[in-house]
Amino acid sequence: MNTKQIVLDALITLLEQKGMSGTERIRKNIIQNPGFMLSDILDSVDKVEFFLLLEDACKINVSDEDQDQLETFAHVVDYVDKEICQ
C-alpha cells in the first residue's frame, strides 16, 4: 500500500468514526485534488486524532509543530513519505 492510500484511509477512518456522511464523495474529492485543505473537514481536535491514527499506522511521530504546518492532504503525504524513508 502506498503512502497516499495510507493517509487517505486514516482520514476516511476518522471521518467514519465521527459519523460523517459522504465519505466516499470526500475520498473522490481528495484523490482529484491533493491540495485539499484538512481544515475544510477537520476541526483542531479531529486533526490531532487524525495524526494519532497516522502515527499508529505508519509507526512515526509527528510533532505538534509539524502538525500545525501540515495544512493539505498533499503536505501530509509528503511528510509521511519523508518520515518513513528516514
Image (cartoon, rainbow, N blue to C red):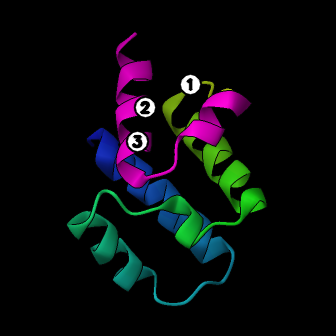
In the image as oriented, which residue stretches furthest toward the left?
A: 32
The magenta stretch spans which residues? 64-86
Q: Residue at x 67, y 43 (%)?
A: 52
Q: Which residue is mark 2?
A: 80
Residue 85: within the magenta? yes
Foreground disc of the pair 3, 1? 3
Residue 81: within the magenta? yes
Quarter in which the N terminus is drawn: top left
Left or right side of 26 for 63: right
| Residue placed most toward the observer, 85 or 72 | 72
| Residue placed most toward the observer, 59 or 20 | 20
Tell me if residue 18 comes above or below residue 83 in the rendering: below
Q: Which residue is mark 3?
A: 75
Q: Do the CB atoms of the residues marked 3 and 1 lie less than 8 Å apart?
A: no
Q: Which residue is mark 1?
A: 60
Left or right side of 27 for 14: right
In the image as oriented, which residue stretches furthest toward the bottom?
A: 21
Tell me if residue 69 comes above or below residue 40 in the rendering: above
Label drawn at residue 72: none
In the image as oriented, which residue stretches furthest toward the right?
A: 45
Residue 33: image location, x then y, percent: 26, 65
Mark found first going from the N terminus, 1 or 2: 1
CA separation in Å, label 2 and label 3: 9 Å
Tell me how many marks there are: 3
Residue 19: image location, x then y, percent: 66, 83
CA separation in Å, label 3 and label 1: 16 Å
Residue type at numbered disc 1 = Ile
Q: Residues within 10 Å of mark 2 (few under 14, many from 20)?
A: many
Q: Do the CB atoms of the residues marked 1 and 2 lie less than 8 Å apart?
A: yes
Foreground disc of the pair 1, 2? 2
